[in-house]
Image: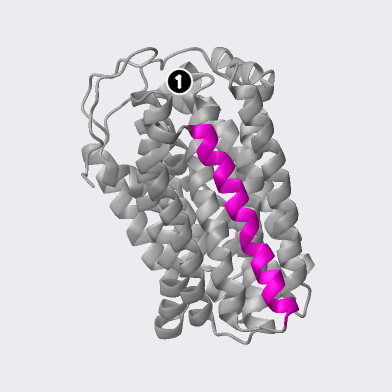
């Protein structure tokens, strides 16, 4: 896989002739935000003990981060449509570094949570890496490029929990945030050196850019694509919110063991994105989305069947949920490309609104999952919740396919 996205002549609404964006740079920028979600999760009990706070309070470091990420995506998109992608990315990443420093030196849970909120500015890399791809490529090619980009990006959250758990055991939880800061610094350096400005529509007044949200809000198909992505990823975020309790309380695994099992689920996500990159242009966005949502549904159903039959091994919980990650990898790049492609002259706003909807639904699902597993960390109620999320995703995806054909 080349470090530059291969340039191909395009027609229609895209006439990009500048230097190609570096795929490695886009991967680094897009990976910072999900890595910041996953790296610290195994350390939450240690953070609670060190700062003298209840575990539930420290767990807000996950949900507040997700909620703030959703809110910021609404702002990041229009700002990048006005000022350009690169300046907004660099400012967002600078704020992320400041928030990371707050977490490293936090002496109270309030300062730690404040740092997590500021860290959410890393959403600029996640949002605008998608918008940059959509600036350069038409609909089907964009989905393929996003698949390759997210496949590479998924490596970071795939190994993040295992690395975070290992760092916490060897050097303490603060060093996990030092490592996160080093990764962010590498992304900033790559963006400064290699990232071109790809927004050819920048400079419009703010009211015009905000009007893009009004246009998008009146497009039912956009919301259906957004909800398809949102409820598909809700299954993954629910697993992220409830999985550690099942792992630690019900199955008796250590933080490092949880990280290793979690890597298998994230590997499925990476595999799904690889297939999106290979086959989206050939098979089409709609077909890949439909296949993805049904594959995601199979994961929790298999886990429920295994546990109901008395097989309560960690592998019976984690390995079938690889299919949840795999299905996400098929759905999310294609749904993003389809939704953003409905209004390519405001790709930043469309990417931000779609991402905010997706992460917002995921944040609610992660909080709900924490309550659903309860103090006992029960796996079957969690998997039933994943089934419900996937059934909603299937409904929205089938409607999107039906509406998208005449569009």
Q: Nearer the viewer, residue 193 or 148?
A: 148
> In screen coordinates, is 2 left or right of 293?
left
> In screen coordinates, is 395 left or right of 225?
right
* Residue 187 at x, y percent in the picture: 32, 49
* Residue 97 at x, y percent in the picture: 41, 53
In this view, the residue farthest toward the bottom is 252
When the figure is inspected, residue 400 is found, relative to residue 258, above or below; the finding is: above
- Find out whether residue 355 is within the magenta segment: no
Q: Nearer the viewer, residue 18 or 207?
A: 18
Q: Which residues are magenta?
A: 285-309
When the figure is inspected, residue 104 is found, relative to residue 270, above or below; the finding is: below
What residue does disc 1 label?
Answer: 82
- Find out whether residue 290 is within the magenta segment: yes
Quarter where residue 222 is shown: top right
Question: Is the C terminus in the top left, top right, bottom left or bottom right quadrant?
Answer: top right
Q: Residue at x 27, y 46 (%)?
A: 24
* Residue 237 at x, y percent in the picture: 62, 57
When the figure is inspected, residue 104 is found, relative to residue 124, above or below; the finding is: below
């Amino acid at each position: 896989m080349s470090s530059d996205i291969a340039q191909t002549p395009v027609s229609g609404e895209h006439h990009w002739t500048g230097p190609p964006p570096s795929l490695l740079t886009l991967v680094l920028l897009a990976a910072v935000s999900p890595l910041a979600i996953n790296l610290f999760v195994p350390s939450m009990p240690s953070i609670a003990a060190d700062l003298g706070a209840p575990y539930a309070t420290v767990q807000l470091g996950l949900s507040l981060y997700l909620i703030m990420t959703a809110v910021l995506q609404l702002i990041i998109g229009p700002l990048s449509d006005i000022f350009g992608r690169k300046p907004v990315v660099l400012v967002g990443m600078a704020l992320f570094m400041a928030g990371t420093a707050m977490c490293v030196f936090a002496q109270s849970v309030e300062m730690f949570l404040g740092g997590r909120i500021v860290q959410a500015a890393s959403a600029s890399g996640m949002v605008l890496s998608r918008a940059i791809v959509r600036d350069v490529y038409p609909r089907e090619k964009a989905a393929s490029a996003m698949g390759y980009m997210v496949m590479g990006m998924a490596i970071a959250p795939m190994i993040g929990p295992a690395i975070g758990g290992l760092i916490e055991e060897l050097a303490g939880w603060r060093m996990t945030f030092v490592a996160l800061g080093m990764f962010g610094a590498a992304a900033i350096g790559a963006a400064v050196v290699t990232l071109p400005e790809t927004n050819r529509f920048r400079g419009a007044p703010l009211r015009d850019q905000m009007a893009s949200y009004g246009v998008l809000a009146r497009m039912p198909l956009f919301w259906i694509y957004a909800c398809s992505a949102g409820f598909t990823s809700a299954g993954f975020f629910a697993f992220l919110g409830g999985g550690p309790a099942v792992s630690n309380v019900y199955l008796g695994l250590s933080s490092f063991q949880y990280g290793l099992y979690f890597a298998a689920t994230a590997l499925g996500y990476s595999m799904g994105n690889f297939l999106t990159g290979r086959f989206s242009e050939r098979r089409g966005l709609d077909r890949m989305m439909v296949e993805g949502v049904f594959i995601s549904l199979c994961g929790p159903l298999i886990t429920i069947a295994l546990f109901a039959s008395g097989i309560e091994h960690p592998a019976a919980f984690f390995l079938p949920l690889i299919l949840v990650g795999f299905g996400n990898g098929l759905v999310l790049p294609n749904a993003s490309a389809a939704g953003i492609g409905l209004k390519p002259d405001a790709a930043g706003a469309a990417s931000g609104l779609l991402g905010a909807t997706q992460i917002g639904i995921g944040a609610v699902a992660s909080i709900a999952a924490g309550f659903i597993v309860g103090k006992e960390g029960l796996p079957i109620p969690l998997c039933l919740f994943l089934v419900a999320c996937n059934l909603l995703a299937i409904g929205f995806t089938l409607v999107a396919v039906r509406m998208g054909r005449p569009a």
